[in-house]
Image (spheres, rainbow, N blue to C red):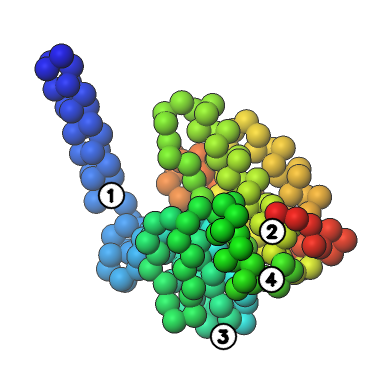
Amino acid sequence: MISGVSEAMSRKGNSSGRWLNRQKRDRYVRQAQQEGNVSRAHYKLEQLDERFRLVRRQDQILELGAAPGGWTRYLGERAAAGRVVAVDPLPVVGGANVTVITGWFGEPEVDAEIEALAPAGSVDLVLSDMAPNLSGIRSADQARSIHLADLALQAARHWLKPGGRLVVKLFQGEGTDGWVREARTVFASVKVAKPDASRAESREVYAVCIGRIAEIAGGGV
């Protein structure tokens, strides 16, 4: 028993060491530290924004899976005359025009708080960087990630204005193509992009959905 515990701890230590070494080598981790940004995620959104012109000065924005705040701070600065509602059960670093809701998106009390701040059909941009806690079982992790993407699409149906925009993290795998097909019934344009700031070995991509179709405005969460 003691030997088994020691081996498990050794494997965990090796994994932690690899993670630390990767962080030290990561260009965007170093850049975030040097520039005072919350995390390397800042650069993923910045690159998507530069390519697709997602964030506007007066935007009303709903951000799901906001912790630790890498996107939140960027959104607050770019939408300086607007408002950001950031949702996550963990602490989020925000700014003067950011309201943080602590809890899990999809829970009735959390959705009610969002609705009080941003009524249905009033939001310009919904973003979701939500990701599951990985179990190591690829099929289960993929199913959880698609469920989170489905929640983000439901949020877009309910809160976005006609013509609004949605950005969602996806992991390439089973269910991704089906999710994109569904999104194309809701938006005029859906493109899948991988920012340079995403790690090359990661299956992570982002669906950028532009032009919420007005005919389905007012759909439920």
User: Gap between marks 4 and 3, in whole Å?
Assistant: 18 Å
Give the percent coordinates (x, y) of residue 203.
51, 39
Q: Which residue is mark 4?
A: 119
Q: Which residue is mark 3?
A: 81
Q: Secondary structure at mark 1?
A: helix
Q: Secondary structure at mark 4?
A: loop
Q: Amino acid at mark 3?
A: Ala
* Above or below, 27 relative to 123: above
User: Gap between marks 1 and 3, in whole Å?
Assistant: 35 Å
Q: Residue 23 shows which numbered tag?
A: 1
The answer to which image quadrant residue 31 occupies is bottom left
Which residue is at a point 57% across and 52% down the rendered structure image?
Answer: 107
| Residue 41 in sight | no
Cβ–Cβ under 8 Å for marks 2 and 1: no
Q: Secondary structure at mark 2?
A: helix
Q: 34 and 113: which one is in front?
A: 113
Discs 1/3, front: 3
User: Gap between marks 4 and 1, in whole Å?
Assistant: 40 Å
Q: Residues within 10 Å of mark 1 (few under 14, many from 20)?
A: few
Q: Amino acid at mark 4?
A: Pro
Q: Which residue is mark 2?
A: 156
Q: Secondary structure at mark 3?
A: loop
Task: Locate the N terminus by quadrant.
Answer: top left
Discs 4/3, front: 4
Discs 4/2, front: 4
Q: Amino acid at mark 2?
A: Ala
